[in-house]
Amino acid sequence: MEESKDRIFPIEDALEMIIMFDGAGKVAYANAIARQKLEYEDDLCGVHISSVFPNTFQETEIITEEKCVTGRDFRNLVAYRKNHTCFPVEARITHSDDGGKDVYICMANDILKKEYLSREVERVREEAQQALKVKSEFVANVTHELRTPVNGILGNIREMLEREWDEQSLKQLHLIERCCDDMNKIINNILDFSKLEAGKFTLEPRKFHFRNMLDYVKGNHINKITEKGLEFFMTVSPRVPEYVIGDELRIVQVLNNLLSNAQKFTSLGKITVEVLRTAQMEGRTELFFIISDTGIGIDKADRDKLFQSFSQVDASISRKYGGTGLGLNICKQLVELMGGRIEVESEKNRGSTFSFSIWVETCGEDADSHTVQDSRKSLYGSESMEDGGKKKEDVRCFGTPENTEALKRNLSKLILCVEMENWEKAEMFMDTVRQLTEEAPHEVKRVVLRLKMAIQKENYEKVTAEFEELNHYL
Ligand code: ADP
């Protein structure tokens, strides 16, 4: 038997029980798992097959192909161990001719184990689903509970702000107000995320004035954008309908997220928003949004994980700008719920372009399916963008009139912030100054670095001294 075991080595270690027997029913070979399961440590060879399958074969019987061969089909049999206990198996029996002698091969699987394993898989799956449900409910409850006290604080702070005149107290109250707003944003993000994850999120479409919605979004960001000295352009194709039916709140949410990112990660140049109508059919319109910035950009490797939950490109950047890394994941899920998709194109240190499409319903004349559509291509390749690119190059090139003018503008804003002890905002202008001096000679860069450190240490005297020195080079 040792010799035959070697000969049929691949089946010796198979996971399936394999038993070979002859026309007289005598077992000629049983692989390791068959010997182990049937508890024949001293080998099964020589045993009659009816000892293993007494309900199927009889000891006196001559085995015939017609009676036992199942071919590729499985048969449920009962296999008996040496100690006469039994277990169910799923078996296939085939026939082969070994030089004129009949050989039968029985391949069997212990279905007790299979059934046990599939029951186990089902149990684990149910447990996981239950855990996910409990987690989503917990997150929804906690975030709801958190929202109430935060809004309570916010309401009181706003009342106090109306009564308070002392400058120092006002500054502190504004700080608390901002913290509460930030906390509310985080709570809302977590709530949306858990609802989307649990598949419990539903859109609430209604009719709204599309351009008014865009004006509202613009109003949310324009102050911060212009404060940073950035330019802002918004263009909407005349083919975009005046009124559409869609979930206005969620469209605003996606745009707000993309615009606040664009604003956060851009300290030089411009932010643009463009909206096109790219398809129209049976009262439905596809709208295409493009949000571009000339900010820090995103590496190719980081771009791939950008839309995953809790993903932030760079820990040091995230610490500086805050955020939970949930925003883009929520945007992706919302856009997909609205029948579209979101994409990003970006170049490190040159800027990013996020684009997304959604489907909305149209009413009245706007629903006409023969109206002309905008082409996505024409926008990317437009001349005005190229002009913007050239202007951007000049402003980054140290010593050009554009660069000097931008440096002076940002430095004067920076010093104003320092005088008002708004160190956080001063740091923001410092970022721009640093980018504007990226190609400057070493001595200039050294002054910029010292200025940056003085701002970080909130050292007024040192800031003004470095500011004076930097001015000599301009
Ligand atoms: P968060 O709420 O932390 O901003 P997001 O999902 O909105 O999370 O963004 C994830 C990360 O993607 C950001 O932390 C940033 O690293 C990167 N990112 C997003 N938008 C931009 C952009 N316009 N320019 C550069 N990096 C960006």
Image (cartoon, rainbow, N blue to C red):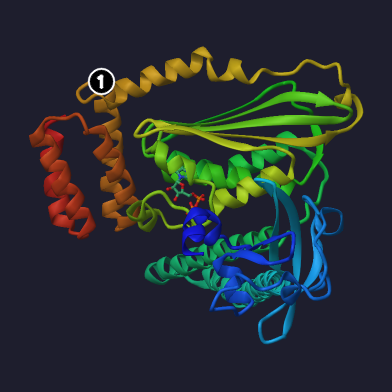
* Residue plotted at (78% across, 55% down): 202
* Residue plotted at (57% across, 35% down): 343
Q: Nearer the viewer, residue 424 or 255?
A: 255
Residue 423 appears in the picture as rendered: yes
Q: Is mark 1 within 8 Å of ligand 1?
A: no
Q: Position of residue 281 (x, y in %)?
A: 85, 26
Q: Amino acid at mark 1?
A: Pro
* Residue plotted at (38% across, 38% down): 299
Q: Position of residue 166 (x, y in %)?
A: 41, 70
Q: Is residue 462 left or right of residue 88?
A: left
Residue highlighted by disc 1: 401
Q: Nearer the viewer, residue 335 or 424?
A: 335
Density class for disc 1 (Cα within 10 Å; few <14, some 14-19, many ≥20) is few
Q: Quadrant of residue 410?
A: top left
- Outermost residue on the left side: it is 443
In this figure, what is the number of numbered marks?
1
Would you place residue 407 above or below residue 156 in this image?
above
Q: Secondary structure at mark 1?
A: helix
Q: Position of residue 65 (x, y in %)?
A: 82, 54
Q: Is residue 5 left or right of residue 453?
A: right
Would you place residue 457 above or below residue 206 in this image?
below
For the C terminus, the quadrant is top left
Q: Is residue 20 left or right of residue 248?
A: left
Would you place residue 87 above or below residue 454 in this image?
below
Q: Position of residue 338 (x, y in %)?
A: 74, 42
